[in-house]
C-alpha cells in the first residue's frame, strides 16, 4: 500500500471507491429462478434463514443508527450507503422467504447500547468473520450444486457487497485508529479482542440454530449432497482461497483483512502435518 493509513488521501480512497462501486438493483425484480419440489425442499430445510434475515435487519439498523454520529462528511456518506445496502439485503432475504415459502418470522431487534460506535465496530468485526467463513461455505455449496445456479448468482450479489463492506470497514478502522495514534501492534491486539467476541457470538448463534432445529432432519438428509466430500481442511482452504480471489478485485492501495487469512494459513500449515483423509472412502469393487 503506497498511501499512508489514516491520511486524508487514504480516507478519500476508501470512501470514494466504496461509493463508486455501489450497484443499483431491486431485490423484487431480480431473476429469481423457478424451483422444483426437490430444490424447494432443500432451500426450506436450511435452518438458518431466520437468523440471516434477522442479522441483515439488525445490520441495517445498527449502521443507520451510527451514521448520523460520524463527523466526517465523506465517511458519513459511505456509512449511509452501507446502511442502505444492509437494509436492501434484508429485503432480498425477505423476498426469497416470501417467494419460496420459507418458514422464517420477523423477530424484534434488540436495543443498541448508547455507544453506537462500539456497536458498529462489534458488528464490523462480526461481518469480517462471517464473510470469511461464508466464502468457504458458499464455494462448497455452489460446487456441490446444492441449489440451482440462478440462486447462487443472486447470492453472489450479496457476497460481493459484503466483501465491499469488510474492505470498507478494515480501512475505516485503520483510518480511525491512526487518527487516535494507535500503532500496528495495538491495532492487532484490539482486532483479536473484537474477533474473539465475534466468534463467541457466532458460536452462540450456531447453538441456537441447533436447538431450534431439534427434531428436524436437516443434518441427516438434506445436507447429504452439500456435505459430500466435506472436510475441515478443505473448508479452511476454500475460505482462504476464496478470500484471496474476492480480494483481488479491489484496488491494491486499499487495506484488506489480514488477520483472519493469517490465522487460517497457520491452521492449514498445522493441518498439513496430519495425513489427509477423504471424508468418504469409495469402496473397492469386490
Ligand atoms: Fe448484509
Ligand atoms: Fe454488510
Image (spheres, rainbow, N blue to C red):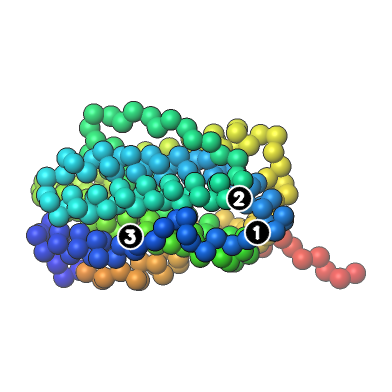
Residue 51 against residue 247 in the figure, above or below: above
Residue 94: x and y in percent read 49, 46
Residue 62 against residue 286 in the figure, above or below: above
Task: Locate residue 48: give its quadrant.
Answer: top right
Q: Nearer the viewer, mark 3 or mark 1?
A: 1
Observer able to see residue 92: yes
Residue 134: x and y in percent read 47, 55
Question: Which label was assigned to residue 251?
Answer: none
List the residue tagged with mark 3.
164
Q: How much space separates mark 2 and mark 1, taking CA atoms?
A: 8 Å
Q: 10 Å neighbourhood of mark 2: few (<14), some, or many (≥20)?
A: some
Q: Residue at x 72, y 56 (%)?
A: 38
Mark sitting earlier along the chain (2/1)? 1
User: Does the CB distance between marks 2 and 3 fall below 8 Å?
Assistant: no
Name, please, the residue furthest toward the front: 29
Q: How much space separates mark 2 and mark 3, taking CA atoms?
A: 28 Å
Q: Residue at x 68, y 45 (%)?
A: 218
Observer able to see residue 139: no
Q: How much space separates mark 3 and mark 1, taking CA atoms?
A: 30 Å
- Total marks placed: 3
Q: Quadrant of the C terminus?
A: bottom right
Residue 125 against residue 33 in the figure, above or below: above
List the residue tagged with mark 2.
100
* 225 displayed left or right of 143: right
User: Does the CB distance between marks 2 and 1 fall below 8 Å?
Assistant: yes
Q: Residue at x 56, y 39 (%)?
A: 104
Q: Nearer the viewer, mark 2 or mark 3?
A: 2
Q: 10 Å neighbourhood of mark 1: few (<14), some, or many (≥20)?
A: some
List the residue tagged with mark 1.
35
Amino acid at each position: 500500500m503506497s498511501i499512508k493509513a489514516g491520511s486524508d488521501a487514504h480516507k478519500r480512497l476508501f470512501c470514494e471507491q466504496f461509493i463508486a462501486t455501489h450497484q443499483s438493483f431491486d431485490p423484487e425484480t431480480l431473476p429469481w429462478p423457478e424451483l422444483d419440489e426437490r430444490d424447494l425442499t432443500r432451500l426450506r430445510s436450511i435452518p438458518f434463514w431466520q437468523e440471516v434475515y434477522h442479522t441483515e435487519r439488525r445490520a441495517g439498523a445498527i449502521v443507520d443508527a451510527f451514521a448520523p454520529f460520524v463527523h466526517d462528511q465523506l465517511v458519513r456518506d459511505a456509512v449511509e450507503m452501507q446502511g442502505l445496502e444492509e437494509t436492501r439485503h434484508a429485503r432480498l432475504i425477505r423476498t426469497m422467504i416470501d417467494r419460496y415459502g420459507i418458514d422464517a418470522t420477523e423477530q424484534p431487534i434488540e436495543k443498541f447500547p448508547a455507544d453506537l460506535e462500539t456497536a458498529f465496530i462489534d458488528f464490523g468485526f462480526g461481518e469480517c468473520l462471517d464473510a470469511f467463513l461464508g466464502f468457504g461455505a458458499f464455494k462448497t455449496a455452489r460446487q456441490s450444486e446444492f441449489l440451482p445456479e440462478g440462486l447462487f448468482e443472486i447470492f453472489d450479489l450479496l457476497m460481493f457487497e459484503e466483501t465491499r463492506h469488510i474492505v470498507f470497514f478494515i480501512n475505516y478502522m485503520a483510518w480511525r485508529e491512526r487518527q487516535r495514534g494507535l500503532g500496528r501492534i495495538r491495532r492487532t491486539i484490539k482486532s483479536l479482542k473484537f474477533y474473539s467476541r465475534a466468534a463467541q457470538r457466532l458460536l452462540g448463534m450456531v447453538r441456537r440454530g441447533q436447538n431450534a432445529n431439534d427434531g428436524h432432519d436437516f443434518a441427516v438428509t438434506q445436507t447429504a449432497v452439500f456435505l459430500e466430500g466435506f472436510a475441515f481442511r478443505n473448508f479452511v482452504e476454500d475460505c482462504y482461497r476464496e478470500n484471496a480471489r474476492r480480494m483481488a478485485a479491489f484496488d491494491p492501495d486499499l487495506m484488506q483483512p489480514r488477520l483472519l487469512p493469517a490465522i487460517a494459513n497457520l491452521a492449514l500449515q498445522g493441518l498439513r502435518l496430519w495425513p489427509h483423509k477423504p471424508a468418504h472412502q469409495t469402496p473397492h469393487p469386490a
